[in-house]
Amino acid sequence: MRKTIFFHLFFVFCVSLFSIEKSVFIINTTDIHSFLDDKPDIFGRNANLLRLSSAIKQRKKEIGEKDKLLLIDCGDTIQGSYPAALSRGETGTIFLDENEFDAWIPGNHDFDFGFERLLELSEKLNGVSILAANLRMKGCAAWKIFNKNGFKIAVIGATLPYLGFTSLESGKSFIIKDFNIELEKIIPEIMRQSPNAVILAIHHGVFSPKERGGIDLKRIAELYPQINIILGGHSHEDNPGEKFMPSTWFAQAGAHARVFVELEIIFDSDSGRIRDIHSKLCGIAPEGAKDTELENRLSTILSDSAKFAATEVGESSIIIPTVPPGVINCEIRELISEAVCEKSGAKIAISGCGTRLAGFSGKIYEGQLFKLLPYEDTVCVLKLTPEKFKIIIQEQIRDFDPRHFQMPWGIFCELDAENRPLTLKSPDGQEWLEGRRAVAFSSYAVVGAGGRFRELAKIAKSPECEFIDTKLKIRDAVKEYLKKHSPVSLFVREWIKPTLSPEQLRPNY
């Protein structure tokens, strides 16, 4: 009996001794926005694509065999810097190509240069699979099996579920499908392939604005224990890794090329089962080396953008300050509103104030203007009745968001004690009681601003509003205005004065 137990224990010991562990490494980036700054942030990290690229290449060299490594980017890759705008997104796709990424999940800002441009750029990506289960688009697959180090790794892609509220082209050039329905369809397909691991790479964070069409990633992990790893994006959160469920690990690589996430999946080589998952955030040192190969490939774009960024576009005879959170009536809104009205022919605008980053004094340059208005939003016009106008203003105040609030300009909006629009008066004192008037908006606002302005998006679709997209970028409208009217002198008027609570003044991310 003792001999039997001894030989059994000896056998178990030998099996465990000779059971080999093998690893697959994953390098994940997201929301890099083609950043090329050289100033470190408050944590000492550099938002620079060239340093990120160098750090990734160094880690690839340390890992050694390419067969052991899977590279995934979770979107918002091609927009966000002046070189990216000048190249219409090519800066970001050159980065993906240079680092030989396996998969790219398009984010909402990857559509900013237009759907046709996204298609054009994606077709140049050799060996990079474009994945998004909830996006119907040419060249885009829902999922793919990658063979790495002898194991089958299934990667499911998913773009922002409420992408339809960020792009005018949604429903026309491309279609956003219900992510939950699509995931329910494809999980059985994937499991029939007997993958050793399943990864969901999604342009969406743990933060879940359900009222805007967001999804609950923890609920996804609960419903689909087959998913071993979720890689997040969009919300710009740093997350080195946490367990959602016993079988699901979540990580997110922050934003702006400051970090990447490295994961290691440890498999049992005999059974092919996952033994463990580790992950960490890898920061980019401010003194870190730049990738000279990538820099050479981007040399023309970088030199052209440096030259154009230093080009003078106008001059201000007053200081145009950066806008503090909660400030509504300000110089920036006056400048943007006057510019979009002049270009569109409208007398009224409902406008935001870009990134709020100004600090203009004296001469104004292309680079400064881009920092204020880095988006590719265009000037749009709706013909509105006073009633529709009031509904739009009421929505803005009711769901006040300091970062996205759209302020009326060209019409004084008097509110009652409950912040409801009471009267609308032109600068000449005439009350707007009837008839339709042309009102200028940004394309991002009229499409719903990521689901924030659903009433506005609904009104914009009404045929009687005679929606027009001028195709002129708001940044270009402001540039033309500065060139024509410099030196500008802006007079700030109190177009609206809502009573805001401390809760409303907190930014809604």
Image (cartoon, grey):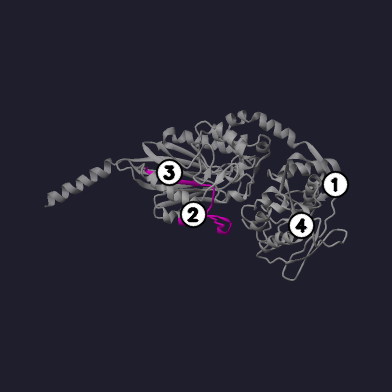
Sequence-wise, which precedes: disc 3 or disc 2? 2
Residue 491 visible, this orientation: yes
Judged from the image, the secondary structure of the residue bearing numbered disc 2 is helix
Report if residue 402 lies within the magenta region.
Answer: no
User: Which residue extends farthest left?
Assistant: 1
Range of residues picked out in magenta: 195-219
Residue 488 circle label: 1
Q: Is residue 394 above or below residue 194?
A: below
Sequence-wise, which precedes: disc 1 or disc 4? 4
Question: Residue placed at 52% from the left, 30% from the top?
Answer: 126
Circle 3: residue type? Glu
Sequence-wise, which precedes: disc 1 or disc 3? 3
Sequence-wise, which precedes: disc 2 or disc 1? 2
* Residue topped by disc 4: 408
Question: Residue placed at 65% from the left, 37% from the top?
Answer: 84
For the residues bearing labels 1 and 4, Cβ distance under 8 angstroms: no
Circle 4: residue type? Pro
Circle 2: residue type? Leu
* Residue topped by disc 2: 217
Q: Pinpoint residue 463: horizontal percent, then vertical percent.
A: 69, 52
Question: Residue placed at 70% from the left, 34% from the top?
Answer: 305
Nearer to the camera, 494 or 265: 494
